[in-house]
Amino acid sequence: MKRLLFRLFPAVLAAGFAGCGTPLPHPLLPEETGPVRIGVVMPLSGHNREYGERTLNGIQLALEEVNNARGIDRRRVELEVRDNASSPEGASRALSELAASGVHGLILGYDTSEVGAVREEAGRLRIPAIVPLATDDDLTEGNPLLLRGCFTDSQQAHALAGYIWYWRKLMRLGIVVSLEPEAHYSRNIARETAQWFSQLGGQVVHTAEFRENDPDLRKTLVSLISYAPQAILVPVHTATAAKIVRMLRELGFHGLLIGPDSWDEESFLRNCGSDPGECAFTAFYSPENPSEENRAFREKFRKKYFHYPASCEAQGYDSMKILSASLGGADTIEKFQANARTIRNYSGASGVYTMKRDGGIDRTIYINTIRPAGPGRPFPTSRYSRGFTYSRLLDFEN
């Protein structure tokens, strides 16, 4: 069987200048001398504050590099940052403020609810934007000016199903899914992984449904284990995922536990138990990515912020770079779109990016595993297992 190879390619960021069309609300014309203003809508208060602050740190590091490299079209780039207070309503208010101030581009939000609240309005206002971390497949539909810096729920679900089937050679999968009204992420990944796994030839033996603070959660998990799954998917938010992983091990499940990018947080590793057993999860970023771009990013980030970066920081950094490249020379909507489509095999901090003509993205997806706590490691730590672009997964299956 062929192995997927993790390859990192040099950046190719050629800009296209063909066509003329409707100007941007504030066109980046050569005769203008003022700064290019990028609006940033991030959760800087509320329950997502930590993630918003970390993403903003990555954006600000990229901003320094863009300006040190003569900015966009030799114009200095400035950020206008607004707090969405971790809420859709806050995101809408922040977008209204930024649109009134005349920003040239946007970096939008942390999670799907924040971005979903403003994606249509950003499109109506015709302001180019990028989403660093929100993974819902539908977010970019209906807005051709909204780029992705992240993979989608269906892409990471496909990667999870492929990892279970091809690399681990397991045939029986159990799934834990949240019934909370706002848990779209949990249900999306559960549904998509089940579909991909069944299509590959595997069997989903049981799907266990629960609600937060469910007093019968332990009983629900015991029932799931009774179906004898070889692997259990836990696609829920970070704190609950850690609790369920710990509980499954206490109940005696010894098979593979697998999760999406919500596991890729230090808080998960601190709360999943000192020895969570065999675990794997998808991630946007791996510090073990050997590319020159990642090594340079890590060192620059450490010097600026006195600690090493993780996924949020890397996604903010790369998203700022991609948006800046797409805005260069873009005095029309068509030129912005043409510029974005020329971003192919771009090697950023988080891996390789190719922007597709249909508005989607082909980029690196990492599968990380977990090693238990041990000498010098008071908590479990994640480690790189493999990385591949989504297109390579499709090539492998074909």
Image (cartoon, helix red, strand yellow):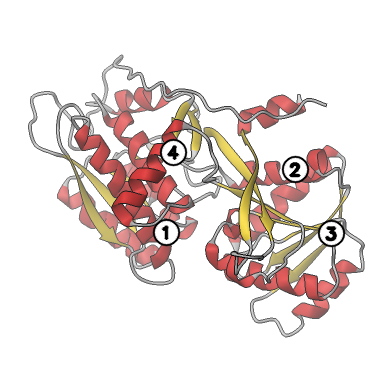
What crowding class fits label 2: few (fewer than 14 Cα within 10 Å), some (14-19), or many (20 or more)? many
Residue linked to disc 3: 255
Q: Which residue is mark 2?
A: 163
- Residue 114: image tag: 1
Closer mark to the observer between disc 1 and disc 3: 3
Mark 1 residue element: helix
Q: Earlier in the sequence, mark 3 or mark 4?
A: 3
Query: How many numbered callouts?
Result: 4
Task: Kindly give the residue lying farthest to the bottom in the view shown.
Answer: 215
Residue closer to the observer: 212 or 389: 389
Going by the numbered disc 2, the residue's amino acid type is: Tyr
Badge 4 local density, few (<14 within 10 Å), some, or many (20+)?
some
Q: Which residue is mark 4?
A: 295
Q: Earlier in the sequence, mark 2 or mark 1?
A: 1
Mark 1: which amino acid?
A: Glu
- Distance between the Cα atoms at labels 2 and 1? 30 Å
Res 24 seen here: yes
Which residue lies at the image location 38% right of the left edge and 47% below the top edge?
A: 316
Q: Is residue 202 left or right of residue 286?
A: right
User: In the rendered image, which quarter is residue 270 located in?
Assistant: bottom right
Which is nearer the N-term, disc 2 or disc 4? 2
Furthest residue in direction front, as rendered: 375
Q: Nearer the viewer, mark 3 or mark 4?
A: 4
Q: CA distance from mark 3 to mark 2?
A: 14 Å
* Mark toward the start of the polypeptide (1 vs 3): 1
Badge 3 amino acid: Gly
Separation of marks 1 and 3 at Cα, in angstroms: 36 Å
- The numbered mark, 4 or 1, whose residue comes first in the sequence reads 1
How many residues crowd mark 3 within 10 Å: few (<14), some (14–19), many (20+)? some
Instruction: Please tell me whether mark 2 sits on a helix, a strand or a loop.
Output: helix
Viewer-nearest of labels 4 and 1? 4
